[in-house]
Amino acid sequence: MREIPRIHFAHLPTPIEFLPNLTTDSNGPRLFIKRDDQTGLALGGNKTRKLEFLVADAQAKGARCLITAGAVQSNHCRQTAAAAAKFGMECILVLTAADLKSKLSSEVLSENPDMTEHKKIAAPDGNLLLDQLFNAKIVWAKPDQRDSVLQEYFDKAEQQGKKPYLIPYGGSNQIGAIGYVYAVKELLEQLASNSSLPYPDWIVFPSSSGGTQAGLILGAKLFEYQGRVLGISVDETAPVLQERVLNIANRCAEHIGVNVELSLDDILVDDHYLGGGYGVMGKNEQDAIRLFGRLEGIILDPVYTGRAAGGMMDLIRKRYFAQDKTVLFWHTGGTPALFAQKYQSALFSS
């Protein structure tokens, strides 16, 4: 495997914990959790692993500004903004939401009737509060204009001599995915060094932009993980997400110089838990958040881990996993979003 530039700033290895109360309550397989909500950067999350490689690549190219895009409560944007602050770089975030106008104050809208650019929002919450704390420049865009606005601001930054580095949505490309190739190696080393940790028959996690799943699938192949890797889709149908993951994984294999070619058969996706759509916290997510909190004192987020954990618990009820197996839930972080007012209101009004 080719040596790839990396900056080590994540808190690794992340812990693996047994979930005894959930295991007993569900009367299912033994449940464990891998705590990537504890990777350290800006309250942690899976994007930190990706940013170790993405920021290293940006620095190698002489970049002085990171630019990326996401939803208003994007975990990826929050961690990118934090990484930029940590390494003395500027950061531009293009944030989108279908109901964005209802979120912005009249003062903001009067200054920016087309929702183009504004640095601050009064009383921000969740990830947006942290974006502003890290001094990211925030650009607003309608969802269908995200890519064009992103390119527009990249071009502006380039013209201003800022040497911008464009990080794709979710940090999910052949470089970002390397973080989860090495995460599999980390997991297997933890299992080998601790006899009290059983070998997981299944790894279950939320999947959306595809980079995390691509890295896990490729890492599983490279480091000979013998179990199965199941991505629970947050927002895409299985065929769409499988193609996305396959593309990233094969490009990642080529980038790191390994002779591995994956196929769609290698990529397991469950798309039965899409609920009301991306960012909509329904009963599935609410029940999972309450369950993990009440039984294990673990915080899930309303968009990713809440949806995936809810799906996993439903699969357990349906006996999808054999009772004598071990299931590892990979917590990808995102907990700051739980403190956004819209999710607090939904969680405690039902």
Image (cartoon, rainbow, N blue to C red):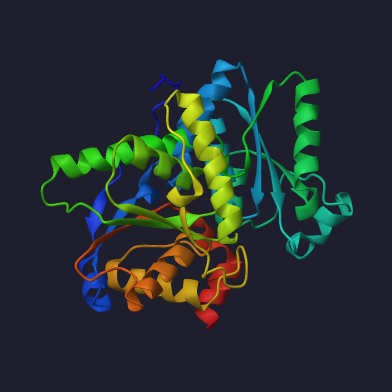
Return the x and y of residue 174 as percentages of the image width and height: 53, 33
Q: Is residue 137 visible?
A: yes
Write down the quadrant of residue 218 in the picture.
top left
Image height of 177 relative to 277, above or below: above
Q: Nearer the viewer, residue 251 or 290?
A: 251
Q: Residue at x 69, y 55 (%)?
A: 122
Q: Nearer the viewer, residue 129 or 60?
A: 60
Please state if 210 lies on the left or on the right of 202 as rendered: right
Q: Residue at x 20, y 51 (%)?
A: 199
Residue projecting furthest to the bottom: 350
Q: Is residue 175 visible?
A: no
Return the x and y of residue 123 as percentages of the image width and height: 65, 58
Quadrant location, the N terminus: top left
Please state if 12 lies on the left or on the right of 121 as rendered: left
Return the x and y of residue 177 as percentages of the image width and height: 48, 37
Q: Residue at x 14, y 40 (%)?
A: 193
Residue projecting furthest to the left: 195
Q: Nearer the viewer, residue 135 or 331?
A: 331
Please state if 24 lies on the left or on the right of 250 as rendered: left
Number of disc labels: 0
Return the x and y of residue 141 as percentages of the image width and height: 78, 50
Image height of 181 relative to 287, above or below: above
Please state if 318 lies on the left or on the right of 189 as rendered: right
Q: Residue at x 56, y 75 (%)?
A: 346
